[in-house]
Amino acid sequence: MILVIAEQRGGALNRASWEAIAAAQQLAGDLPVSVAVLGSGVDALAGELAAADVAEVIAVDDPLLSGYTPDAVAMAIEGLVAARTPGTVVLPHTYQTRDCAPLIAARLRRPLVTDVTAIKGTGASATFVRQMFQGKLTAEVAPIGDAPVFVTVQVGAFRADAVRRGSGAPVSRVSVAIDAGRIRQIG
């Protein structure tokens, strides 16, 4: 299963979330794609995401996720990964993701491939293309290590309008443990 973490702020989805879904759909092959949205009061956003051709939309709704903090988001994603055991977690490469994706991958001791601009192949055998040396070279990266692999997709590398639409994915709610005492900053 491929899990996409959609990003929202103030009740509006970031366009890059749709680009991450398009990348996940390309990567999936025969694997199911699920999309999670984190926040407080995210039911409407989950309904919006259900228009994509995905297996399910997961709403992680918690008051501690009402404003962005890397610690709360990291704990939520860690809990979600433990609950759903995806093979790959796809995130849009935004400032928030740059902040929390390395934290999550390091805590879980899993591979992280950032700033992906293209995907070659599908599923576990896929490789990821990313720029190196300030765009002077590109590298084709094959992550090594246990699942899940964390992948961030560069904004604009995949087209939001390329997302395959479905007939209404089911929406489920997942509760995760977020320890307020471990949140070091308030967003």
Image (cartoon, rainbow, N blue to C red):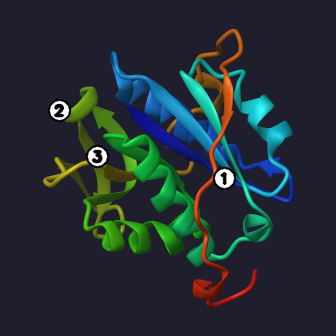
Q: How many badges with numbers are in the image?
A: 3
- Left or right, 10 with respect to 180, comes to right
Label 3 neighbour load within 10 Å: few <14, some 14-19, many 20+ = some
- Left or right, 138 with respect to 177, comes to left
Q: Position of residue 121 (x, y in %)?
A: 24, 27
Query: Image height check: is 111 above or below 43?
Result: below
Distance, label 1 to label 3, CA atoms, is 22 Å
Position of the N terminus, as image quadrant, is top left
Amino acid at dot 3 = Val
Q: Position of residue 3 (x, y in %)?
A: 47, 40
Label 3 element class: strand
The mark closer to the camera, 2 or 3, is: 2
Distance, label 1 to label 2, CA atoms, is 27 Å
Q: Position of residue 113 (x, y in %)?
A: 31, 57
Label 2 neighbour load within 10 Å: few <14, some 14-19, many 20+ = few
Of the image marks 1 and 2, the number of the one nearer the N terminus: 1
Q: Which mark is residue 7?
A: 1
Amino acid at dot 1 = Glu
Q: Which mark is residue 129?
A: 3
Amino acid at dot 2 = Ser
Q: Position of residue 131 (x, y in %)?
A: 32, 57
